[in-house]
């Protein structure tokens, strides 16, 4: 069977991100987008694919430890390799690190963090020794010249993206003479190798300038909203921790962990948006590991659980109901604590507080309650 024979050809992915980011203003491989470096998102589809056996992350020496952390979080076998002065030199460095068993190579730009699994499948499934994702051009094309503007015929013009899939032997042969080119497809064409195009994706943005990152933010991903609620009794002799900040109070919250009701409500909101089980499932009160636990650490774990499910937190809105003390003086410190745990800017976290106007058990100071809404953004699929 054709598909089985393709699957039997071991495929490795080279993620190339050793550039200095001249047009971006700084090296961008480890620039954060949705709580993770671009390198993480660029490599993630390859880590998820059963048809890719190994990752090679090619980065600058300065980014080595950051890239090693990314590789660990992706949970795929692979290695981190230091790139060269040019893109082609970096591909050669990655190529040299491939095991002999890798027969096909996917070369991908670390600056493209939004490849869908569908695009990767098309690149993997197409026949031929060199497969390139490409898009046709719909805008009019003009060229400025010293003799004045010229109109360029756009028929048949393609914008070529990555990941590009090449047979390992072909890729090695193309690079044997240490040539320089914009990408490996260009080398294949210069050498007269047969090339096949598959449909690229508009969402497969290459982050070249800071504006590209902003554009990506607008086009990529589904949005989900989750809601959480929590309540804890207040008693003398306990600490009162709200959104990771300890408040001066006569009475504190009773609970197995640090009893941070606001943090717990937010954790459930994040889990809810990702359709994951609630905090009682992940952190059972019967488990001694969570006795006195810092709920900010638990919130970080929840953030990671959501990310593994393909979601990142874009915004959190928390309402605290507490008679005393007043939240106002501590609000900014609380926002910062939650923002750091969720890897958001402080602008991504809202904390509101109210009293219960003396009504009921909350109004008589017997408890603290919190409601939270979390907005999560996901991948295109
Ligand atoms: Mg709780």
Image: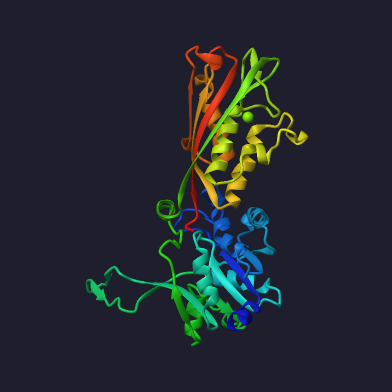
Query: Is residue 168 at least partly visible in the picture?
Result: no
Quarter of the image for residue 258 reads top right
Is 140 displayed left or right of 334 in the figure? Answer: left
Give x and y (percent) for residue 306: 58, 47
Is 17 displayed left or right of 137 in the figure? Answer: right
Give x and y (percent) for residue 305: 62, 47
89 or 100, which is in the foreground? 100
Task: Single out the residue that lies furthest toward the right.
Answer: 288
The quadrant of the picture occupied by the N terminus is bottom right
208 or 300, which is in the foreground? 300
Give x and y (percent) for residue 310: 55, 53
In the rendered view, would you say 315 is above or below 160?
Answer: above
In the rendered view, would you say 186 is above or below 228?
Answer: below
155 or 261, which is in the foreground? 261
Give x and y (percent) for residue 252: 65, 18
Task: Single out the residue that lies furthest toward the left.
Answer: 148
Quarter of the image for residue 253 reads top right
266 or 178, which is in the foreground? 266
Q: How is the image coloured?
A: rainbow
In the rendered view, would you say 8 is above or below 204?
Answer: below
Residue drawn at x 34%, y 79% as measured from the top left: 156
Ligand 1's quadrant is top right
Query: Is residue 27 at least partly visible in the picture?
Result: yes
Residue drawn at x 62%, y 40% as measured from the top left: 300
Task: Single out the residue that lies furthest toward the bottom.
Answer: 192
Residue drawn at x 52%, y 20% as measured from the top left: 327
Q: Total label count? A: 0
């Amino acid at each position: 069977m054709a598909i089985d024979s393709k699957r039997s050809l071991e495929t490795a992915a080279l993620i190339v991100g050793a550039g200095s980011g001249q047009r971006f203003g700084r090296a961008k491989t480890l620039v954060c987008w949705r709580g993770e470096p671009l390198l993480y998102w660029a490599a993630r589809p390859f880590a998820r694919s059963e048809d890719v056996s190994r990752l090679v992350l090619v980065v600058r020496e300065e980014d080595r430890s950051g890239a090693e952390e990314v590789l660990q979080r992706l949970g795929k076998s692979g290695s981190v390799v230091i790139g060269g002065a040019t893109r082609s030199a970096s591909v050669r460095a990655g190529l040299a690190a491939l095991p002999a068993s890798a027969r096909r190579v996917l070369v991908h730009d670390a600056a493209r963090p939004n490849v869908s699994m569908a695009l990767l499948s098309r690149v993997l499934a197409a026949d031929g020794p060199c497969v390139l994702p490409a898009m046709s051009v719909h805008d009019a094309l003009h060229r400025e010249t010293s003799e004045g503007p010229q109109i360029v015929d756009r028929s048949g013009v393609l914008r070529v993206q990555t990941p590009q899939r090449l047979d390992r032997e072909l890729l090695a042969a193309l690079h044997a003479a240490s040539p320089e080119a914009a990408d490996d497809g260009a080398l294949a064409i210069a050498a007269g190798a047969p090339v096949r195009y598959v449909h690229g994706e508009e969402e497969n943005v290459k982050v070249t300038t800071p504006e590209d990152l902003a554009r990506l933010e607008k086009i990529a991903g589904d949005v989900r909203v989750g809601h959480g609620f929590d309540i804890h009794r207040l008693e003398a002799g306990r600490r009162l921790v709200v959104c990771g900040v300890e408040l001066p109070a006569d009475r504190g919250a009773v609970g197995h962990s640090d009893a941070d009701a606001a943090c717990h409500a937010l954790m459930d909101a994040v889990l809810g948006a990702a359709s994951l089980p609630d905090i009682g499932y992940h952190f059972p009160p019967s488990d001694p590991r969570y006795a006195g636990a810092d709920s900010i650490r638990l919130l970080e774990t929840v953030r990671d659980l959501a990310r593994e499910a393909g979601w990142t937190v874009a915004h959190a809105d928390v309402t605290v109901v507490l008679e005393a003390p007043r939240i106002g003086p501590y609000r900014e410190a609380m926002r910062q604590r939650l923002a750091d745990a969720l890897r958001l800017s402080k602008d991504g976290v809202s904390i509101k507080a109210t009293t219960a106007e003396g009504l009921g058990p909350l109004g008589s100071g017997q408890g603290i309650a919190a409601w939270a809404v979390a907005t999560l953004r996901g991948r295109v699929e």
